[in-house]
Image (spheres, grey):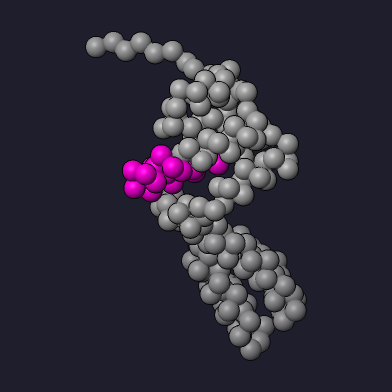
Amino acid sequence: MRFSHREILLKQMDARQFIDAGAIPLYGLLPSMAGLNEQLLQQALEDMIQYYQSRDDEEHLRDELLCFQALFRRARPLATAQMESVLRRIRMFDSLLDDDPWVQERVALGKTRGKAQASRQYIPLIVQARFPDLVSLANECIAQIQESDTLGQVLLTLSTLSNEDEARSYLSSLREKK
């Protein structure tokens, strides 16, 4: 079997041709095409929404809106005020978009990274305030830890230890684990 294929550059295609043809399942790709304006994109969104809602197909609507939004934000085909107007229409479907497994995974990952980053910031501050001689040891230990839950536990433990000897012993045990 042989397959012949040819590369299609979306940025060289005219979005109006897809709109005129009513190729709604391809509207998610429109933001990366030429010939765009706010009115055309707003109409495309309305057509997409009506098309998928009339078929009671929220899953495909969600996928198309996510694709449309991702390409729209990357391509930035309009002026800022017009961009915001189009994004406002998409945001009306945030609850639908939030149900997407990919979006949920990205949100969870962001929360985990945020927790880890916060712990990495606060551990040295707590050690500096309570046990100034152990700052470099603490920094060495937290540099080796990747898991946000572990960093949170280190933060909690260091804030409750009673003296520098306990803190040194705790930090040394962390260093030995890695």
Q: Can residue 29 be seen in this view?
A: yes
Query: Taking 91 as reference, is 124 above or below it?
Result: below
Query: Residue 118 sits in which quadrant?
Result: bottom right
Residue at (67% x, 71% y) in the render: 122
Residue 89: x and y in percent read 58, 48
Residue 90: x and y in percent read 55, 47
The tally of labels here is: 0
Residue at (32% x, 12% y) in the render: 3
Residue at (56% x, 68% y) in the render: 151
Residue 69: x and y in percent read 55, 41
Q: Is residue 152 left or right of residue 137?
A: left
Residue at (53% x, 65% y) in the render: 148
Q: Main secondary structure of the magenta part?
A: helix
* Image: magenta residue range: 49-69
Queried whether the magenta region covers residue 73, the answer comes back as no
Residue 17: x and y in percent read 52, 20
**Is the N terminus in the top left, top right, bottom left or bottom right quadrant?**
top left
Query: Taking 107 as reference, is 159 above or below it?
Result: below
Queried whether the magenta region covers residue 50, the answer comes back as yes
Q: Is residue 70 visible?
A: no
141 and 35: which is toward the camera: 35
Residue farthest to the left?
A: 1
